[in-house]
Image (cartoon, helix red, strand yellow):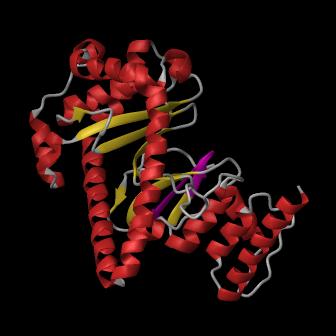
Amino acid sequence: MAAAGAEPGCDPGGGARFFCTAGRGLESFLMREVQARLEATQVEYISGKVFFTTCSDLASMKKLKSAERLFLLIKKQLPITVPSLSKGKILNEMQRLVNDDPGSWLKAISLWKELLECDTKREKVSQRDANPLKRKVGENEIVIAKKLKVEEIQMVEESHREDQRDRLTEYYLEQGNAVTQTEALQEQGPQNDLVKTAGTENLEDLTFRVSCRCSGNIVKAFTAQEVGRVVGIALMRKFGWKANLRNPYLEIFMHLSDAYSVVGIPLFRVPLASRTYIQTAGLRSTIAWAMASIAEIKAGALVLDPMCGLGTILVEAAEEWPNYHCLHKVWMLLFLTSHLGKSSS
């Protein structure tokens, strides 16, 4: 396990710093994959997460198959030592995640915007060069798939957060002074210099939401919602951003545990593990891909899975190794297996 020392989100000399979440036990698969697909360097992991540096664009990173979600790293540092601190000092430590190095936040957000802009330009060029009829069909399929995924995610989020939104918004906007009494807030003068330095003059109008995950001793002192409030208020005070829990421009992800404190920006709303080409939920797609990769499938190979269930491993194999003969055989076997199963039942 790599030591969780402080790291910047962007390394100008060797690319940007990212991290992916992964299922337990899949970290080694993801480490090999980022090295092979993205030519990543400085690859390291902690339980459930893989950190790496790369110059690759978002289009290349979308192809990661063993990752759950992809984040641009803002900060990774040692954990907050909850047992030895009072509640007020713990609040101070949480706010220091923002106040100690605000420049790293602005640099990361500037880089995040550049990545999204480059990806948008690339998609426009590819759509312009594509066949108009094919492009229209493809766009409709993508829009429908994205809409379904986003609606599904929104429904889940609404069910979990409906009771918290009004209270959190009021807390962000009206109760900030009460929560931050334990630390003297820094003056807003340096803030404007930092904004100009990062080349993000419109950051004052940025809307955001903080999503937190807490584990270990910190859960005994604070809930994830309370941590989000504290960090959210610190961001509002430091940068002048506005909280928007329903439809934010920017989402900040934090994970505080007994081993590390990690802060990042999710690069895609829909997780990488949500495949548009898998219509029915079965075996987790990341696990299916890992199992197919262990088989070391070569071009033209015949892939058999007599106990395929919903055929997720075969689908992942066919998508990852799209050789014509291999693809045809895999889908034919999937078709026959499915129909034989229905006939026998």
- Quadrant of res 170: top left
Q: Which residues are magenta?
A: 44-54
- In the picture, measured across the screen, residue 233 lies left or right of residue 198, that is right
Q: Taking 272 as reference, is 252 above or below it?
A: above
Judge left or right: residue 36 versus residue 167.
right
Residue 205, image x, y percentages: 15, 41
**Where residue 133 sits in the image (x, y, percent)?**
37, 80
Task: Give the quarter of the image for residue 318.
Answer: bottom right
The front one of 277 and 184 is 277
Residue 24: give x, y in percent of width and height. Answer: 68, 47
Q: How many marks?
A: 0
Q: Is residue 45 magenta?
A: yes
Q: Is residue 30 left or right of residue 164?
A: right
Residue at 48% across, 27% down? 160
Closer-to-camera residue (246/255): 246
In percent of the image, x 31 and y 56: which residue is there? Answer: 112
Residue 175 included in the magenta stretch of the image: no
